[in-house]
Amino acid sequence: MDFAVARKRMVEAQLVKRGITDQRVIGAMLNIPRHIFVEEAMSAQAYSDGSLPIGEKQTISQPFMVAKMTEMLELTGREKVLELGTGSGYQAAVLATLADRVYTVERIRPLALKARKALDSLGLLNVNLRIADGTEGWPEEAPFDAILVTAGAPEVPQCLVDQLAIGGRLVIPVGDRTDQRLVRVVRNPDGSVVGDVSLDCRFVRLIGKHGWSEEP
Ligand code: SAH
């Protein structure tokens, strides 16, 4: 299988045709080998139009959702970014090529270790990974120019809003246990905070102090 060809098809059919216009996001997703972030047995499906299981009952997000959320962060290359829910590490890799520094948090150790390996194999040295409950953010490294939550939350955790820099953007799926909508929160230059809601989505749950309680 020619992965570069599959990647190009993915970008054209799934991203550009559906309205992704940020050329930096498009470039990053053309370059980053998504197949190294899934199990080898699944590498032929790595560029398909959906999420895929990555073990531990978690998933790597659909390529379009990765592109859409990244575009909503409006990255220029200078930002310090926080991601909650490292999962496979694919989204962190996209962020790492579009921002200055990435801090990513995963609560499930085996996933975090696999993600670290994949990120290292691409030489992405600007990604800091921590195994912890990400719903508390990463206060020692705050403020962040962009915060991306890649698991579904019952509400926007205030402590994450508090870790946004002036002008900073937070993107988070908010809703019930199965269905959410993407919410974007922006801290204005005067310090005030505004939010707006965009598309419907379906993420695995954000579990932690300011998320859902542990699975029954
Ligand atoms: N961004 C990932 C997809 C994430 S799936 C990728 O590119 O592959 C959501 C991930 O969030 C899961 O791995 C899950 O374990 C993790 N997660 C859920 N609650 C969390 C929390 N409180 N802190 C950190 N990670 C969390």
Image (tube, rainbow, N blue to C red):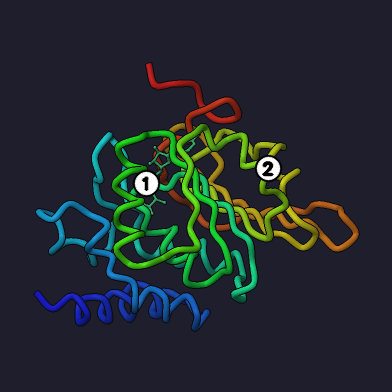
Task: State the CA–CA distance, disc 1 to disc 2.
Answer: 22 Å
Quadrant the C terminus occupies: top left
Q: How far across and down, in percent of the image, does residue 54 sit?
A: 25, 45
Q: Which label was assigned to residue 87?
A: 1
Q: Secondary structure at mark 2?
A: helix
The amino acid pointed to by label 2 is Glu
Residue at x 37% of width, y 46% of height: 87
Mark in the foreground, 1 or 2? 2
The residue identified by callout 2 is: 140
Q: Is residue 192 above or below residue 3?
A: above
Residue at the limit of the structure toward the top, as seen here:
216
Q: How far across and down, in percent of the image, does residue 136 sit?
A: 62, 34
Asked whether the viewer can see residue 142, the reply is: yes
Hey, which quadrant is residue 17 in on the image?
Answer: bottom left
**Other residues around mark 2 within 10 Å, as few (<14) / some (14–19) / many (≥20):** few
The first of marks 1 and 2 along the sequence is: 1
Asked whether mark 1 and ligand 1 are closer than 8 Å, the reply comes as: yes
